[in-house]
Structure formats: structure tokens, C-alpha cells
Image: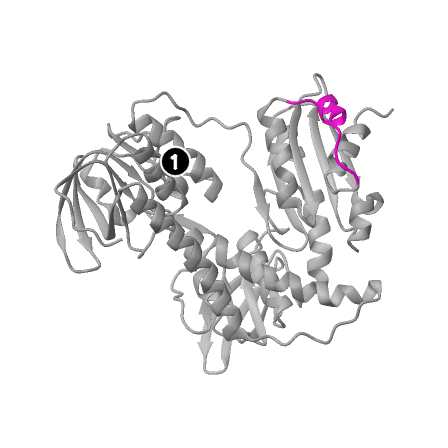
Amino acid sequence: MNDSIPPQSQLVVIGAGPGGYSAAFRAAELGLQVTLIDPGERPGGVCLYRGCIPSKALLHVAKLISETEEAESVGVRFAKPTLDVQKIRAWKNGVIDTLTKGLGARADKLKLTTLCGTARFRDNHTLQIATAAGEEGQLVFKQAIIATGSRPVMLPGIQTGKRILDSTGALELADIPKTMLVIGGGYIGLELGSAYAAMGTRVSVVEMTADLLPGCDRDLVSILKRRLDKNFNEILLNTRVMELKEQKNGVAVTFEDKKGEQSRRRFDKVLMAIGRRPNSEELGLDNTSIRINEKGFIVVDGRQRTTEVGIFAIGDIAGEPMLAHKAYGEAHVAAAAAAGQQSVFDPRAIPAVVFTDPEVAWCGLTETAAREQKIKVKTAKLSWRGNGRALTLGRHDGMTKLIVDAENDRLLGVGLVGPGAGELIAEAVLALEMAATGEDLRAVIHPHPTLSETIFDAAQMLFRG
């Protein structure tokens, strides 16, 4: 991303993460002249450079380590793995490099103007640009798409360093600490905690609420927690972190439990994973009529339009859920709208996947959410203990859960926990988008022996007396 600042552009996209580059590519395919601006050298954003992709690379390493340990139960014994941290880091960075180069090549093929730098609104049709090469100038645009993403939340007064990390620092894999405290029991903390635990770190997790993965179905979380209880050194629920003090030999942490009793311990490193916040502060939005809500998200309508005519917002900055695939969908809607086409973002289901071991995935309504909406539901919960494929994998710690409307059999939600749950959830998303019923799911022939049969078998349970 090293073009010179153009004087004007039909469409400018600010941010080159999953939402930004998808919007830019689609808009260019629809015939618009597009300028893409991002601080990164190539498109990719947080997801590719410092999020989804590097974390999944480390989780793959963790899975390989775990499988060598589990193999002994089926009669295959391996020597204890030796970790070459430098080589693992280089492999991870190679994956990132391959993908970002591919995105850069596509940007070139579509003849996008790409700028490595930052942008700030001077008014509703002018941006002030500062490039990494030191060039400064103004760009006049007809339309704009804001896709600046989000960043990790830190505790007040705490800064990252060698021992106190955010997700970005943890993914750099500087070393494998002997002990680590993960603050936050959401998906980021559990994924990175799982990776480090598999690589030999004694991981402790602290969560201020009563359970892990707030918002996820409790039936699914209970199965994951049973495994995490074995893999992690400890999981502290209903516990707050009151103080962090970075010292020469580690980080001193003061905890407070739900009774108000305090305790203090030392960890080699601390990972902050308490959430993310939208990057909306440094954009000069006060020079426009764009409205921001109390959480810092830009307010948009179903076509991703902000309250400023001709300016759209997508991805993390446009609201929950902060997921790359949600940004992809919004990107195509915004690009189509900018090109004058009719398009609206109105999915029935946005899947969520936690890439722990076992994986957790769900879409649609949870049972709790359905009941809160006063919907009378039927549920089917199928353990994977009787699934042939699960047993041949040496893993039976899984469950498939279906939630249907008790009055009309319409599918409302699906939850999965187990190996490969993130791949299996796509069938459920399609079923929800097609307004499928429980009867539809049990009428579909699933291949045998596969984990996907658990969806079929769960659907059968809905019709048993």
C-alpha cells in the first residue's frame, strides 16, 4: 500500500481489515473507483495480522501437542514434543505473509489506489491523509466506508509491556512463560489460554462473572469447562482483579472474590482479554453529522448508512457482534449500496465459534434467549458419546443442541460443542436462513459415519414421545 494521495476518489474505504478490504474489492468489481487506506503495509487488518489467523495458527500447534498426548489411550505413544518457539513463530508469520500478499495482489489486480497511512475527516466530503512515507494531503470523496475496527480494552491505569500483554502481544509468542494469568473468560482469553497451556504454561483464568463465555448456552459451556478444568491450572469465577504490579520477576496480582476476601499471587505474565472497543475516536467524526452511541459504535441503518449522507460504516465499528464474517456480510451490503444497488444486511443467523478444544459454535437463539422472548420451545440435546465418528476420533466430549418453536417446529437456534464444531455450524446457519424446521433436518440424509449425523440424530429426538 504505497500509492500517492489522489486529489479525489469516488469511494474511499478507511480500514483494510476483513470488512474494509471486502468492501473495497466488491465496490471495485461493481465499477467504482476506490481508494483504500490503512496503517498496514498490505490489506488484512487486526484479524489477519494480530487476531483470527495467528491465533488459529497457535491453536493448531496446541492441537498437535494435545493429540500426541491423547494418542497413548489408543495404543500409540510419542515422545514428549520439543517446541522450537522461533520456528513456530516464523511459521505463523509465514501464514500471515502468504495471506496478506494474496490480498495485496488482488488489490493491484482490481486497480485500487492503496495508501499506507491514516485518515481523518475534515468535513463530510474531505479527508486529511498522512501516509507512512511522510506525505500529507487532502482527499475529496463522493462516498466513504468506515471500517476502522476495534482494539483491546485495558484495565484503567494499566499499560502493556513485556509482562502485561494484550492479545496482540500474546500472539507475538516472544517466549513460553512458566505461569500466565488470563484476565477474562471470553473467547479470546480461552483460545489464547488454551494455546499457551498446551505449549507448557501453567495457565490461570480469572472471570468476574459466574461462568465462562457469557452469552453462550450453558449446556455447551459446561462441557468445555470440564476439559479446561483439566488443562488449566485454575479457573477463578466471580473474582475481580483489584491490582496489577509489574515487578522484575513477574506480575503481582491482587484478587477479590465474591465474599470480598482478597488474595495475592505472582505470575510470569498476564494476558488482558476483557473485551474490545471500537476505533472511533481519532477519525474526526465530530466534523461530520455521524452519530455515535454510548459504547462508541457508529449508528447505522440496514444498508450500513450512517447519519451522514454518502458515508457508511461496517465491521466492529458498526456494532456487535465483533466478528470478521459479520464484517464480510456488511461490506457487501455497503459496497452495493454505494454502487446504487438495493441491498440490506438482515441475516437470520450470524454464527459464533470459539476455537478452544473442544470447539464451541452456535447460531440463532440460545434456549435462554428464546425463553426470555416468551417463545415456547422444544429442545433436543444429543451427547456425542454414541456417535461412531466421535468414538473413532477418541473424543466423546461433545453435544449437539437444537432449539425449535414448540408451536410450528421452526428452527430457532443450534449449539454445538466438540471437535470440528466450527465446521459443522455452517449447516445450521443455512438451515436457519432457509427457515428450516426440525422435520426438515431429520429428512436430510447425512453421511455416515460423521459428526454431522449428530444434527440428524438430534432432530430425530424432537419427535420422540
Q: Which residue is mark 1?
A: 331
How is colour applied across the structure in the image? one colour
Residue name at image x 72 percent, y 58 percent: 227
Instruction: Pick the residue in front: 145 or 104.
Output: 104
User: Residue 196, image x and y in percent?
Assistant: 58, 67
Occupied quadrant, residue 172: bottom left
Amino acid at dot 1: Ala
Q: Secondary structure at mark 1?
A: helix
Q: Is residue 123 left or right of residue 206?
A: left
Q: Residue furthest right?
A: 465
Residue name at image x 26 percent, y 43 percent: 112
Q: Specify start and end residues of the magenta stretch as a single range.
A: 436-448
User: Residue 12, image x and y in percent?
Assistant: 24, 39
User: Residue 284, image x and y in percent?
Assistant: 21, 44
Q: Residue furthest bottom?
A: 248
Q: Decide: few, some or many residues near mark 1? Use Cα within 10 Å; few <14, some 14-19, many ≥20.
A: many
Could you tell me which quadrant the C terminus lies in? top right
User: Residue 220, image x and y in percent?
Assistant: 69, 45
Residue name at image x 44 percent, y 51 percent: 47
Residue 247 versus residue 99 in the image, above or below: below
Q: Is-magenta flag for residue 53?
A: no
Q: Residue furthest top?
A: 408
Occupied quadrant, residue 235: bottom right
